[in-house]
Amino acid sequence: MKAILTICCFALLVVQSQLFAQTTATKVYVDWNLFPVEQKEKASYFRVAAVDKDNMLNGPAEYFYLNNEDYARNLYAKGNYENNARTGKWEWWYANGLPAEIGYFEKKTSPDKQQNTIKLKAEEYTYKIESYWDSTGVQQVTNGNGKVQYVENGITTGKGSYQNGVKHGEWEGTYQIPDTDESIPFTEQYTAGELISGVSYDKAGKPYSYKVLEILPEPKGGMNGLMRYLMQSLRYPTQARRKGIEGKVMVQFYVNKDGSLSGIELMQGIGGGCDEEALRVVKGFPKWTPAVHRGQEVKVRMSLPIVFKLG
C-alpha cells in the first residue's frame, strides 16, 4: 500500500497571511501517487475531502477507486488531514473491498523560521502500522507486529518485519519513482523504526549507500535564494490590480535529476493575468539541487502556491 507520500514540498509567497476554518467537501481526481490531475483519464482514484478557503486539506478525506463513482463503499483510503498533512487513524482497502491496512500518522512540522514571506517546508511524519492483510484476506500484521510483503503490479515494493508498529530488522524491495519508468531496488536495516543503513542499485547495478531515506530538492541559494528570486521577479498584473483580483495560483512542476524544471503547468488559477505571471516566474527559475532518494538523484513533482493579495 502507498501508505506514505515520500516527498511533499510547498512554497508560498504571502503578502498578508490568513487562516480559514471553514471547509467545503470537494471532489478531485488524483493519480496513483495521490497528486491532483485535471483529466479523469490520467487518474487512478478520486478524492472527496474537506478543503478550506486557502485550498488546504483540513478535515475528513476519502479516496475511491474510479470504478465506483456513486460514492458507495468501494473505498481505497480514508482518514483526516490537518494543513495538507495526514494525521490520526488512516485505513486502506483493496479494489475487491477487502481491508488492506490500518495505521496512525503523527505529524511533525518544524516551525517556520520566517513569517509572512517564503515558506519552504516538508511535512514529516511518524507512522505506526496497526494491522495489515494481504489481498486474499490473510492478516500479516496484528497489533503492530508481523511480517509483510507489499506487492504492486507484480513487483515487491517492500518486504520485512514490523515490531510495535514500526519497521525493524532487514527490509528489501523496489521503489518505483513516481511519474517515471525507473525503479530502485534496495536493502535496508532498521532498528525500532529508525533507518540505520541502506544500499540501493541503479539500472547498471551500481550500489549507492545511504543513511538518510530522502533529501528534498532545493532551489538555487536555498530559502533565501528562492525568496529573493520571487520578490524580485513577481509583478502584480495591472488588470488584476485594477479589478481587485486576489487569491492563490497553484503551479506544479517537476525537478529533474539534473536540477532543471519541466512539466510546468497551472493547477489552479484566479485570472486577471495572475495565472500567466505565476507561470512566467516559475519558468524562469534557475536550476535546483535535485532530490535524492535512497542515495540516488531522482525526479520529483513539486507544488508552488503563489498568493496574490492587495494590501
Image: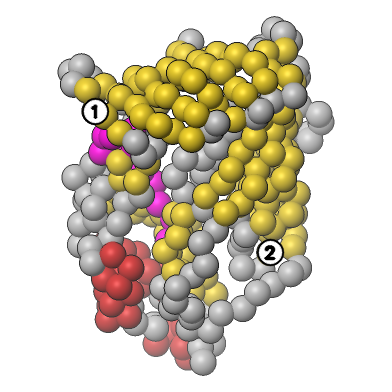
Q: Is residue 299 magenta?
A: yes
Report the front residue among 207 and 23: 207
The local crowd at label 2, few if under 14, some if 14 to 19, many if 20 or more residues have their Cα within 10 Å, is some
Percent coordinates x, y for residue 94 in the rendering: 68, 20
Relative depth, front residue between 129 and 19: 129
Q: Residue at x 26, y 34 (%)?
A: 296
* Residue 240 horizontal/vertical position (percent): 46, 83
Furthest residue to the right? 72
Q: Secondary structure at mark 2?
A: strand
Tell me which corner region of the image, top left, top right, bottom left or bottom right, holds residue 198: top left
User: Which of the 4 image quadrants contains residue 3?
Assistant: top right
Does residue 21 appear left or right of residue 310 in this picture? right
Location of the N terminus by quadrant is top right
Mark 1 residue type? Tyr
Element type where label 1 sits in the image: strand
What percent of the width, then of the height, locates residue 232? 27, 81
Return the mark for residue 208: 1
Q: How many marks?
A: 2
Give the magenta part as a residue range: 293-304
Q: Residue at x 47, y 40 (%)?
A: 6
Mark 1 or mark 2, whichever is nearer to me = 1
Q: Amino acid at mark 2?
A: Asp
Mark 2, residue position: 52
Report the side of 264 relative to 124 (left or right): left
Q: Nearer the viewer, residue 234 or 2?
A: 2
How would you rate the neighbour count of disc 1 (Cα within 10 Å): few for under 14, some for 14-19, many for 20 or more?
some
The answer to whether residue 250 of the structure is visible from this angle is no
> From the viewer's perspective, is residue 179 above or below residue 263?
above
Q: Earlier in the sequence, mark 1 or mark 2?
A: 2
Q: CA distance from mark 1 to mark 2?
A: 42 Å
Q: What secondary structure is the magenta-colored segment mainly? A: strand
